[in-house]
Amino acid sequence: MPEQVVTVAGSVIVGILLFVLIGITAHLLWKKFCLIYSYEEFPNPVKTTSVNAILQDQSSSEIQPKSTRSKSVPFIIPPTLHGRDWINLTNEEQIQEDSNSCMTPQSGPRSSFHSLAGAYIVGTINPELYKFPEDKSETDFPDGNIGRLWFSIEYKEASETLLVSLIKARKLQPPTDSCSPFVKIYLLPDERHYLQSKIKRKTLNPLFDEHFVFQVSSKTLLQRTLKFLVYHVDKQKHHHLLGQVIFPLKNETLTDDSKVVVWRDLEKENLETPSENGDIQFSLSYNDYLSHLTVVVLRARGLKLQDESRAASVYVKVSLMNHNKLVRSKKTAAVLGSPNPEYNESFSFKANQTELDAASLSLSVLQNTEQKSHVLGRVVVGPYMYSRGKELEHWNEMISKPKELVKQWHALCYST
């Protein structure tokens, strides 16, 4: 009898131990199963929100006017990517928290609406960071502006062709309310031949989108200048010049198959009759802080060339004088065979303010023919000791407006 009691007691104890072991094992398996399908919470979450709250916020934001919408867009991780490792959240970022930590994934197809049920927000995207910079060339027009022209240039070295694309014009100022513009394009120094765009009827902002081809060798390319003349055609078919754009190619880097898109403001063409020996236009500026005298040689017109051949080259020599003694001289690049050359070159001279009363500038236009230089004309600007009239006025205006470029035309005087 005692042996039977011991046997029964042992059996009960073993049964209890097995039951406890099975319970512990089942509990561990259930806990592991829950961890697999539960959400992985990131450390130090700042703010929590439920899916329902997210959906309610989204639906309410659609009803509210645009002015009350948030400037940021939530970036949501879909449930299929929850198992991946993510970096720690920063401030103002949210994480999903669900009361049911042991959520079982649903089988079968799911709509886009239900796909948010297992999503949580890891950050926001600011749309302001992805906006393109505003093109102010369409809106910023200075006072007195008579129009603006957009065009592009491209040089094909293999075929030695210059491709000019006429894009558009804006804010043209015709003599009447109506405007029917077109453009003539020259490749200087050749002023006998030009290419012309189509006429755009009744618009101050024409869109051309036309392409033109000039044949020019790579050796002379940088010595050429593009000239755009913008005209208006009235009802009597008379042409009225609205403005011009002068674009020297030497200032551009034209590599093979690379297009350069530029815009320029229109300038009024000087309709004055050239002087007997021609005229030259240049700007003067004096920086009293740096003691620099700057001369910008812009262009010349109406030159009396001694040799009409295109091989003849014309350049400008700028000389700084002190008490009629040469201090230093500089030269522009030569332009081939044009009576109206374009330069747009800047030169700087060191000149103390105390020396300006005895200083002067001499600009001479010279022509090279058969290894000889001929002076086509000359002009001197300076104080009363060396100049009079417009030349003296130009010098005095430069002194009175420090650090500002003062531009004027001057008649050339012939000198041997």
Image (cartoon, rainbow, N blue to C red):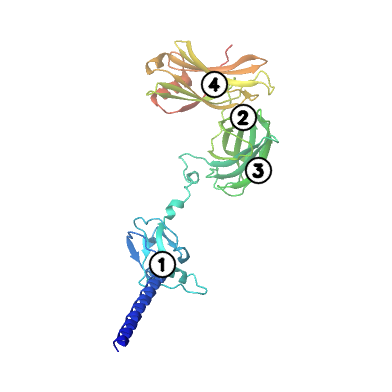
- Closer mark to the observer between disc 2 and disc 3: 2
Say what secondary structure mark 2 lies in. helix
Residue at the right extreme of this rendering: 159
Q: Few, some or many C-alpha atoms within 10 Å of disc 1 (few <14, some 14-19, many ≥20)?
A: few
Q: Which amino acid does label 3 sit on?
A: His
186 lies above or below 136: above
Earlier along the polypeptide chain: callout 4 or callout 2?
A: 2
Query: Viewer-proximal residue, 262 or 37?
Result: 37
Residue at the spot of label 3: 211
Quadrant containing the C terminus is top right
314 lies above or below 43: above
Q: Which residue is drawn at 48% across and 20% down?
A: 391
Residue at the spot of label 4: 411
Using the numbered discs, state the Cα–Cα distance from disc 1 to disc 2 in whole angstroms: 61 Å
Q: What residue type is labelled 2?
A: Leu
Earlier along the polypeptide chain: callout 1 or callout 2?
A: 1
Residue at the spot of label 2: 222
- Closer mark to the observer between disc 1 and disc 2: 1
- Closer mark to the observer between disc 1 and disc 4: 1
Say what secondary structure mark 4 lies in. strand
Q: Residue 292, image x and y in percent?
A: 42, 22
- Closer mark to the observer between disc 4 and disc 2: 2
Residue at the spot of label 1: 58
**Cβ atoms at labels 2 and 3 below 8 Å apart:** no
400 lies above or below 22: above
Earlier along the polypeptide chain: callout 2 or callout 3?
A: 3
Query: Viewer-proximal residue, 183 or 313?
Result: 313
Query: Viewer-proximal residue, 365 or 34?
Result: 34
Left or right of 3? Residue 382 is right
